[in-house]
Amino acid sequence: DTGVSQNPRHKITKRGQNVTFRCDPISEHNRLYWYRQTLGQGPEFLTYFQNEAQLEKSRLLSDRFSAERPKGSFSTLEIQRTEQGDSAMYLCASSFKGARFDYGYTFGSGTRLTVV
Amino acid sequence: GQSLEQPSEVTAVEGAIVQINCTYQTSGFYGLSWYQQHDGGAPTFLSYNALDGLEETGRFSSFLSRSDSYGYLLLQELQMKDSASYFCAVRDRMDSSYKLIFGSGTRLLVRP
């Protein structure tokens, strides 16, 4: 297993378009998280899944954002009607419930979104 | 809600020791974690403290004082490759969530 994989690495889109990102977590990990990070800031929580169930979504998150994790494997994050303020690095992480380092997330390299 | 405070920047000399502090405010508490992130890279897990005291992993150590809502990351024998951003993160136990809340990060610059 090569870790958490995210695609695409970079995405440039015009304002108003929809975009979708994919995350493939470490196969043994049953928890998957999406974060957003802007320059000079820490990762900001968006949502997380345990297996296929979406257990929490940030209250700050617009309804334009939706995430899925069908069959508890890969996950997708969709942003509809993108705005310039959506420009950020979107990070996916996974972890394994029950491990001592459950709080030790493994992050992917992220998808950098630029909305023009 | 939760909030974390850490210095925005720290500069140190190669071979020296540096301490990065983190104070937190949560309605509950379930451990303090530290992550390292190089420019353009992914955050990587460094350490986790659930109980008071010092955890040592090679050149890196992390300390926690729950009574003071305070922790720090200690980096010894600094190397140029340690130049990166360091984030503290907490999980708030009260909301039964497994998400981590991250601080804004401390940018460490190691000079020759």
Image (cartoon, grey):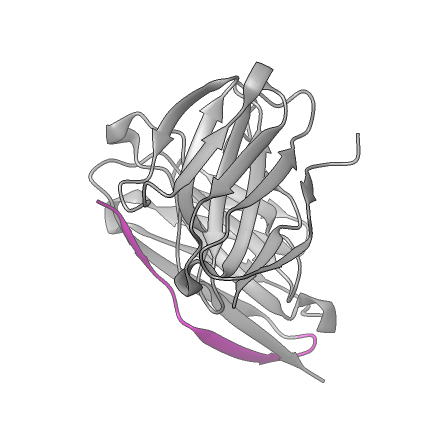
Query: Residue at horizontal 20%, vertical 39%?
Result: B27
**In front here: A57 or B39?**
A57
Q: Quadrant of residue B4?
A: bottom left
**In front here: A32 or A106?**
A32
Query: Residue at horizontal 62%, vertical 23%?
Result: A29
Answer left or right for A115 relative to B65.
Answer: right
Q: Which residues are magenta?
A: B1-15
Answer left or right for B112 relative to B109.
Answer: right
Figure check: A27 above or below B11 = above
Residue A51 in sight here: yes
Looking at this view, name the residue that lies furthest to the right.
Answer: A1
**In front here: B20 or A47?**
A47
Answer left or right for A79 relative to B80.
Answer: left
Figure check: A103 above or below A100 = below
Instruction: From the top left corner, tell me how far across and down residue B58 is, in percent.
Output: 68, 50
Instruction: From the top left corner, tell me how far across and down residue B94 is, in percent.
Output: 24, 30
Looking at this view, name the residue that lies furthest to the bottom.
Answer: B112
Query: Residue at horizontal 65%, vertical 31%?
Result: A25
Q: Is residue A11 magenta?
A: no
Query: Residue at horizontal 73%, vertical 36%?
Result: A3
Instruction: From the top left corner, tell me how far across and down residue A47 is, in percent.
Output: 41, 36
Q: How many marks?
A: 0
Q: Is residue B7 magenta?
A: yes
Answer left or right for A77 relative to B7.
Answer: right
Q: Quadrant of residue B66?
A: top left
Q: Which of the image's four quarters has the N terminus of chain A?
A: top right
